[in-house]
Amino acid sequence: MYTYENPIIKGYNPDPSVCRVGEDYYLVTSSFEYFPGVPVYHSKNLADWTLISHCLTRKEQLVLDDARPSGGIYAPTIRFYNGRFCMTTTNVSHKGNFIVTAPDPRGSWGDPIWIKQGGIDPSIFFDDDGTAYFTSTGSDDGKTGMYLCALHPETLEQQTESVLLTQGGGGRFAEAPHLYKKDGFYYLLLAEGGTEFGHMVTIFRSRAVTGPYEPCPHNPILTHRGMNAQYSPIQCTGHADLLEDHNGNWWMVALGTRPLPGVMLHNLGRETFLAPVVWDSGDWPVVNGNGTIGLQMSGPLPAPPAAGHSFGYTEKDFLYIRNPEPARYTLAPERKAFTLRGGGTALRETDGTPPTFLGVRQTEFDMTAKADVTVGEDGAKGGLAAYYGPDYHYAVYLTRFGGVTYVRTCRRVHDIESKSERIPIYGDTATLSIQAGKECYMLCCQDTSGKTVELARGAAAGLCTEGTASMTFTGTLLGMFAERGEVEFTEFAAD
C-alpha cells in the first residue's frame, strides 16, 4: 500500500477518463473553449501524471470560432484497442460527437470521425468479440437518457440506430455513461445530480449490452453531497471512470472541487481525483470503503509515488482562448520570453477574433504570476491577467500614450468593470505580478527601488464558478495578454 495526494491532476481538469496499455496509463480531461483541446496525461503509477500532448491541435479537429464561455469540448473518453488509441468527445459549439484516433498518443491524432448519435459525454466500449459500442447522453422522442449504438470496428462509423439503455437512477441530469464488462456482466457507470454540490456516481449492470440494467443496491457509489466545506475539503465529486491496473487492482478517477477555505466556492476549477475500488460479494464496486475521497489516500498503486508533488508547467501547458491566430504569438518558453500582438480584442469580448491571451491553469490557492512587461509603441496595451472568463477576470497592465508608459489595473465581475487611475512609470518596462490568495488576488507592480507595490485587489470569490451569471465549467488561468500593439514578456513565471 502507498500513500498519495489528491487531486492527482490539479487545476481545471474535469471529466477524467483513463485507459491502460501494459504498464502505462493515459488520462484525458475536458478543455471547453480553450485551445489546444483534450490534454493527454501519462503515468506509471496512477498518482503522478505528466502532460504529454493534446488530442486536438489543428483547426480541422477543433473549431471554436463560435464557442461561448464553457462551450466547445465536453467530457472526452479515451480507450485503447487493437493497437490504436481512440478518443471521443463532443464539440457542443460545432457539429457534436466525434472520434479521433492515434497509434501513439504523443503524436498527431487523426481527423474527426463524426457520429450521428447525438447528446454529450460520449464513450466507446470494445466487447470481447471486438464489437465496438458508442454510448452518450441524449434525447429521442422526448426521452432523455443513455443511448447506445454499434460502430464499425475499423472505421468507427455508426452502423446501427440508437437504443435507450436507461434513464438513470432518479438523480437529475443523469449523464456520462461508461460501459465495462466484468465476470459476465455489462456495467454502466453514470454521473447524476448535476456537476455541482449534489454530484454523484451511480452504477448499473445487465447480462446483455442492451439491457435491461439493474441499479446497484448501494448507489450512489461515490458522492460528497450533504458534506459542507467545514467537514469536507473536497466537493462535487462525480463524472468518473473505472480502471483495472496491471496488477489486477481496480481504481476510479473522478472530478471534484477544492472549495476556498470555509466557503462553498471554488476558483481552481473541477480537478481530477483518484480512489481505490474493491468489488463486494455481490460483484458491485465499493469506492474507498465508504464512497468518499480524501486529500490524502492510500491504496495499492502500481508503483510508489514520487516524493513531493510537483505541478510546474511546460510549453504544453499553455492555453489560448478559442482558435488562436499564430501570427499574434512569438514564443520562446525555454527563455521565458513571449511576444504577443494585440488585434484590438479585449478580454471581455466573446465574438469575432479571440483575445490575444496565453495562460496556464491556476493549480493552487496561493500562486503568483510574474513577468517583466514591455510596451514600446504608442497605443500598445498588455499585461497579466487572472482569467476565468470574459466577464470574470482581473488584470494589471501597461499602456503607452504620447511617449509615456502607464501602469493600470482592471477588475471585471459580471458586467461591472473597475479600473484604477493610470500611474506613469519610468521607461517602457515594468515588473508586473498577480498574487493569488485564498481571499483575494493582488495586482502589483515593482517600483524603481524593486519593491512590489499593491495597486488593487479583487476578491477570490469574484472568480469562482458559483458566482457566475451563467453555468460555467472551467477554472482560473494565470497568463499574459495583449489588447493592442506589440507587448513583450520576459521571465514569465506562474508558481
Image (tube, helix red, strand yellow):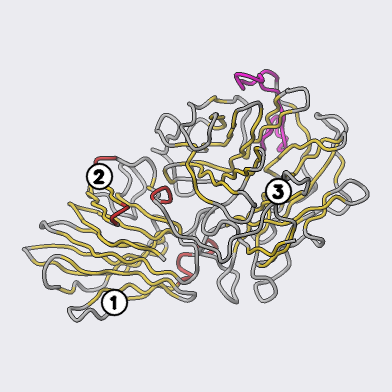
Q: How many marks on residues?
A: 3
Find disc 1 in the rendering and name its residue.
455
Residue 240: within the magenta? no
Q: Where does the C terminus fall, quadrant-wise?
A: bottom left
Residue 241 spot, x, y in % from top left: 69, 46
Is label 1 in a helix, a strand or a loop? strand
Is label 2 in a helix, a strand or a loop? helix
Q: Amino acid at mark 3?
A: Ala
Q: Vertically, is 360 above or below 432? A: above
CB within 8 Å, label 2 to label 1: no
Along the line of sight, the residue nearer the viewer: 111 or 251: 251
Residue 159: within the magenta? yes
N-term-proximal mark, 3 vs 2: 3
Find disc 3 in the rendering and name its residue.
191
Find disc 2 in the rendering and name its residue.
328
Q: Nearer the viewer, mark 2 or mark 1?
A: 2
Is label 3 in a helix, a strand or a loop? strand
N-term-proximal mark, 1 vs 3: 3
N-term-proximal mark, 2 vs 1: 2
Q: Within 10 Å of the Cα at label 3, are there few (<14), some (14-19), or many (20+) other Cα atoms? A: many
Q: Where does the N terminus fall, quadrant-wise?
A: bottom right
**Image point (82%, 52%), residue name:** 278
Q: Within 10 Å of the Cα at label 2, are there few (<14), some (14-19), or many (20+) other Cα atoms? A: some
Residue 15 spot, x, y in % from top left: 61, 48
Residue 162: image quadrant is top right
Q: Which residue occupies the extreme right position in the image?
A: 281
Residue 382 spot, x, y in % from top left: 24, 59
Q: Amino acid at mark 1?
A: Leu
Q: How far is disc 2 from disc 1 in space, using C-alphas?
A: 29 Å
Which stretch is magenta?
135-160
**Image point (63%, 56%), residue name:** 47
